[in-house]
Image: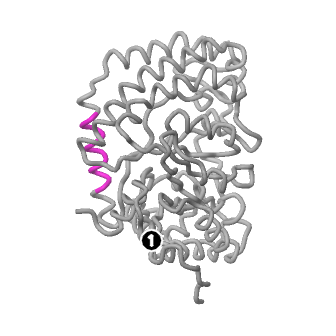
Amino acid sequence: MPSAPQQLALDTILCNDTDGIGIWLINPMEWRMIDRLAHVPEGTYQTQPVDTYRTMLVNSGCCMVDQWIPENPLTMGAHGFERNTVRSATTGAERVVLDGVPINDPDDVAAHLERVAFPGIMDAIRTFDEDACVRRIIDSEAHVQRILGPELLKAPYCPAFPTLAYYSYGYASYFMAYALYPELMERHFSLQADYAVLRNRAMARAIIEGGLPPYLRLDHDVADSRGTLVDVTSLDRIWFPHFARSIAPLTRAHIRMIWHCDGNLMAMVPRLIDAGIKGFQGFQYECGMDYEAICRMKAKDGDGLLIIGGVSVTRTLPHGTPDDVRRELRWLVDAGPKRGLFLGASSSIAPGVPWENLRALVEGFRHYRARGRGGLDKPRN
């Protein structure tokens, strides 16, 4: 039997009627704030990250976790990424070298795709073991659920689908290759989708056979504040057909999939819905994401959307006041769907957010989880 918090999370995923509003995870990156939310001495998170992080989530009122990343804040110092942080292709690496191949220009990207990436995907397809994959997923989800305990529901996270590989090759070289070699890009998306279909068949089986929540959040940044990283009509031609094909095993199994939104993704929203996505998370309202309009939209089958409405981590939490936080929570609730609404933060919470704003956030979480859509009182000092 699910606990009361787990049942609230599951009913929210299923878009059932609930008395309270479900609370999604939060990921503060400043260690002393994690300690403070966990009610432990400063320095505890650094030495006991998993237990402290879990306690922080429970104390913050959270009841659903999809991406379990308790050690993620250890990658960042008190003032952001420190000088000794390992840099990747998209976080300031001076040189991009992939499988021993230097990536300096679009031709290097094309050569690596043809000589290394494509054969690697084809080999993964040939050797894929569906039964073993099902067992791994079920065992992994059960392991994390045991760590989380009865206060939190672990939901599966991020199925396979074709991605834009800028994270491997770097922005400049990859996007130049995307413009110069569209047929090669589509070949990459097609092969990724071939492999994703196999993995998502296994994911669907694991969710059904393991009795897991029928939910998945897809996480891939494809927009900035101006819009999609590439012309959305090019995605219509060479990406969306393979994306829809890749997630088809999950849509057929009635797994509710939601998309993580960074930047201004409005042009993709109807296209994602048409492909089978049934909800969204991570709205950057200041970039043009129309939360109210999205919350009024329907899935392709006519169902309401599952929405994770987050207080802005780029505007309200770092630069606002506690009253601003409370107002934004109230707006998220009032404008959100009547069923299928989680509250959270719009993304990870960077260092530097005032404690008073974090306190207002978690007090709001506890309020809405306990009292549903009732008014939000100001916290007592």
Q: How many residues crowd around disc 1 within 10 Å: few (fewer than 14), some, or many (20 or more)? A: many
Start-end of magenta stretch: 134-145
Q: Secondary structure at mark 1?
A: loop
Please state, as top left, top right, bottom left or bottom right, where the C terminus lies in the image: bottom right
Residue 54 shows up from this direction: yes
Please state, as top left, top right, bottom left or bottom right, where the N terminus lies in the image: bottom left
Up-down: is 72 above or below 254?
below
Q: Amino acid type of disc 1? A: Gly
Up-down: is 27 above or below 169?
below
Q: Which residue is mark 1?
A: 20
Up-down: is 240 above or below 353?
above
- Residue 141: within the magenta? yes
In x, y percent, where is residue 118? 49, 14
Find residue 3 and report its image quarter: bottom left
Residue at horizontal 69%, vertical 50%?
289
In x, y percent, where is residue 268? 64, 37
In the rendered structure, the answer to whether residue 34 lies left or right of residue 185 reads left
Residue at horizontal 67%, vertical 42%?
265
Residue furthest to the right: 226
